Image (cartoon, helix red, strand yellow):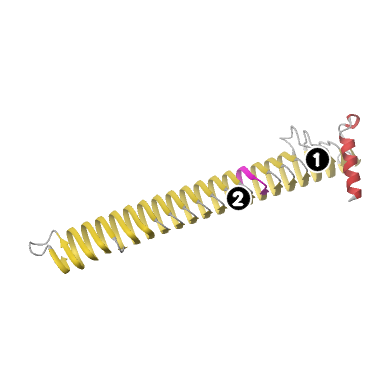
Amino acid sequence: MKSLRLVITAAVLISTSSALAGGFGLPSEEVGLGFGNLSRFSGVRLNWADRDVELVQGLNITIGPPRDNQNARYSGVMLNLIGHAAGSTTGLVLSGIGIGDGDLRGIAVGGIGIGAGNMDGIGLGGLGIGADNLNGIFVGGLGIGANDVTGLVVGGLGVGADDIQGLAIAGLGIGGNDISGIAIGGLGVGGNEMKGIGLGGLGIGGDKMTGIYLGGLGVGGDDLTGVFMGGLGVGGSDLTGLFLGGLGVGGDDLTGGFLGSTIGGNQIDGAAITWAYLKGDHLRGFGTGAYTRTQATTGLTIGIFNSTENLRGVQIGLLNHAANNPRGLKWLPGINAHF
């Protein structure tokens, strides 16, 4: 440790000296052990702050913040006390403050955060990570934001991106245009098109959702296909699959199996099981409820009170009403039928 302190002290004195502004290296200014702002160097390089670097390969140690370094290229191990900035970096980057890079490949750890154009590998940002494209494993203390994300991303508060593929976990929520894979949001998950598995502490919402989704309070969307569970309810335009809503399930077109305190839809095809109220314009299949009310029923309904304007099937209940039956058979206890 004492030797390392002496080396760093020497690097600071040399690199900040006006007489040796460009630095020097042993055995040459391009290879070996370098001190100062050597723009092209391979080996072990110590500098106060990088500026207008062209290419550095090996171990690079800096203390101060970089300047005018957007075209720099690095390869190897970068240890930066205040920050790291470059056009492209390949290897391991450890920065006390933050990391800014055009293309970053490897492992990057930024005390405050990481910002990059494209990043492939593993990234850890104390506050957050922002990039155009992320591929790999990334953890942001507060959050992660990018255009395209592929891999495993964890945001302390949230994750937001245009396209997310893989596993995304956020303390509060996840938002994106296209989400494919597994998305877990402490409060919720929202997207335009979602495929895979989603879990939202409060709820999940999307335009088109395919897969398995669970919302603590509810799930809502336009087109839902798969298995959906909402603590309070599930609602959408077109629902296909298996749906469970604590209070109810509702939509325009329902196809599959449905379970909830209340179920409502324009067209219901399949099995609608409720212990309270079932309402639909057209029911084809099987339905239950204390009160079932439809404009047309094709199939079987079981309830305390069943009522339909047009019956093609059987009603079983305390009182059954089929408006299309002949007079005297419209209201019947126990069972009613029309074929």
Inspect this view and state whether residue 159 appears: yes
Q: Residues within 10 Å of mark 2 (few under 14, many from 20)?
A: many
Which residue bears the numbered disc 1?
A: 63
State yes or no: residue 133 in magenta. Answer: yes
Q: Estimate the x, y position of residue 310 in percent, counting from the top left.
A: 17, 58
Q: Estimate the x, y position of residue 27 in percent, counting from the top left.
A: 92, 42
Inspect this view and state whether residue 27 appears: no
Q: What residue type is labelled 2?
A: Gly
From the viewer's perspective, is 224 left or right of 321? right
User: What residue is rendered at 13% in x and 59% in y?
Assistant: 324
Q: Quadrant of the C terminus?
A: bottom left
From this viewpoint, which residue is outermost toward the top?
A: 18
From the viewer's perspective, is 116 left or right of 234? right
* Lower position in the chain sequence, tag 1 or tag 2: 1
User: Can you tell which mark lies on residue 156?
Assistant: 2
From the viewer's perspective, is 133 left or right of 288? right
Q: Which amino acid does label 1 sit on?
A: Ile
Q: Is residue 169 above or below residue 9?
A: below
Q: What element carries label 1?
A: loop
Q: Is mark 2 on a helix, strand or loop?
A: loop
Who is closer to the viewer here, 39 or 17? 17
Q: In this view, does 57 lie above or below 304?
A: above
Q: Residues within 10 Å of mark 1 (few under 14, many from 20)?
A: many
Q: What stretch is highlighted in magenta?
A: 124-134
From the viewer's perspective, is 100 left or right of 8? left
User: Can you tell which mark lies on residue 226?
Assistant: none
Which secondary structure dominates the residues rendered in magenta?
Answer: strand
Q: Estimate the x, y position of residue 263 in percent, counting from the top left.
A: 31, 58
- Count of numbered badges drawn on the protein: 2
Q: Is residue 236 above or below residue 64?
A: below
